Image: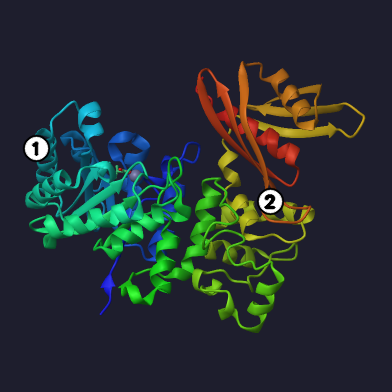
Amino acid sequence: MSDRLFIFDTTLRDGEQVPGCQLNTIEKIQVAKQLEALGVDVIEAGFPVSSPGDFNSVIEISKAVTWPTICALTRAIQNDIDVAVEALRFAKHKRIHTGIGTSDAHIRYKFNATQDEIIERAVAAVKYARRFVDEVEFYAEDAGRTDNAYLARVVEAVIKAGARIINIPDTTGYCLPQEYGDKIKYLMENVNGIDKAIISTHCHNDLGMATANTMAGVINGARQVEVTINGIGERAGNTSLEEVAMIVKCHKGLNIETNLNTKQIYPISRLVSSLMNMPVQPNKAIVGRNAFAHSSGIHQDGVLKNTNTYEIIDPHDVGIDDNAIVLTARSGRAALKNRLKMLGVELNQEKLDLIYEEFLKLADKKKDINDDDILLLAGADRTLNHRIKLEYLQVTSGVGVQSVASLGLNISGEHFEACASGNGPIDAAIKALKKIIDRHMELKEFTIQAISKGSDDMGKVHMQVEYNGHIYYGFGANTDIIAASVEAYIDCINKFKL
Ligand code: KIV
Ligand code: ZN
């Protein structure tokens, strides 16, 4: 019989720590519902004490989903636990995830404590959390760089105190797969009472080994994996849910099963990428645009004869539907609504009407409308309440002439216009913008990307603008990349703390 592997998704907590990719509560609920449809066991919904936004998201996600356990993160501090308990009050199944750093570096520099004091604090936190919930998960932060013998002492103590799940994070993404696997094996063999708990992996990808380390943990006895959609997360990210899911599906010899409906992988990957404005690298395993695209003649020939020659995964198994209807200007509201539903976005009639209007405008400019376009349109109302909006933009540019831009802004209902020349059309447009909004702001980073292919494609622009010592992240999407760039700049300005 196969062993069950529990999937703990932390897209909405660790994943959401990517700078500039924060979601609002409504967006988090959308992702949580799709995670439920995907079949994850646990959704880590936030770190309630960290902000009112996180607190509120845990409450709303708890109300919105039924089956998955809702987990809230805390430090090993009573007040954190009290706030988490409060935030989890509507969850049908709840878990508190508490913990403390256990590596020498954390003990010495973060806590200025001794090893024994850390064990005392860990035990006290677990006991305190157990007063309120049955399921307490303990994390030993920086376990990847913690001495195994000491880690075993910590784990034994917290299991005795009532922790049911033990998370062994490789917080800095430092471990080698063999080393991480050996760590899990060591705990399985040396901790009294380990049979009363489930060991969980939590691997970061700083050296590109998160998935390999996670699998080494599973092979050595871990039965929960902490993962994110598209592998998103701070720095180089976390272990990707889709990679682990397909590894255990492909390698039957592992004798591991999950509750995942893998056909939901692609839709949720697109949804998360779109809501977070975070492109998926084209060669990303499982969900990248090129993950199933064979370009060499030898491969194409083989795949045409029999897909088994070069494909280890059937793209349909991860929800890539090559027969997906491409929407065009002739598609009706029902087709749009249906496609959005498939992508995890459910809308009321009023919002559907609004998006349909935008859809028709886009379809005028662009022949085929794909999933990314639709998701972008669905998120377009994010700018609805913005104080500053672009009203029009006109640019003249070319070879041997100076670029000139004139633009109109609507700022809190008032109209402003300006015109400027510059070193290229984007420079000219931004200079015109700065004539209206005269602040000391500096463009720090700027990327332009086409979403899929075709010269009529939507361009996506990500920007970072520094203002008053802070970096602000902005995003714009338009078939006109100069307009997308100005929209991204305005998006940054709308976020300024004044
Ligand atoms: O990476 C880490 O150590 C974490 C813990 C807070 C679980 O995210
Ligand atoms: Zn982490």
Q: Which residue is mark 2?
A: 358
Of labels 1 and 2, earlier in sequence is: 1
Q: Is residue 233 above or below residue 369?
A: above
Q: Is residue 78 above or below residue 93?
A: above
| Mark in front: 1 vs 2 | 1
Provide the secondary structure element on which disc 2 rests: helix
Residue 416 seen in this snapshot? no
Query: Which quadrant contains ligand 2?
Result: top left
Residue 44 coordinates in the image, percent (x, y): 32, 50
Q: Residue at x 81, y 27 (%)?
A: 406
Indicate the amino acid at tag 1: Glu
Q: Residue at x 51, y 74 (%)?
A: 312
Provide the secondary structure element on which disc 1 rests: helix
- The reply to whether the residue tagged 2 has its Cβ within 8 angstroms of ligand 2 is no
Residue 74 coordinates in the image, percent (x, y): 24, 40
Q: Residue at x 58, y 74 (%)?
A: 310
- Colour scheme of the rendered structure: rainbow
Residue sitting farthest toward the right: 400
Q: Which residue is mark 1?
A: 120
Q: Residues within 10 Å of mark 2 (few under 14, many from 20)?
A: some
The image quadrant that residue 244 belongs to is bottom left
> Residue 50 or 384: which is nearer the viewer?
50
The image quadrant that residue 386 belongs to is top right
Residue 179 coordinates in the image, percent (x, y): 29, 52
Q: Residues within 10 Å of mark 1 (few under 14, many from 20)?
A: some
Q: Are marks 1 and 2 in contact (CB under 8 Å)?
A: no
Residue sitting farthest toward the bottom: 305
Q: CA distance from mark 1 to mark 2?
A: 58 Å
Q: Is residue 4 left or right of residue 119?
A: right
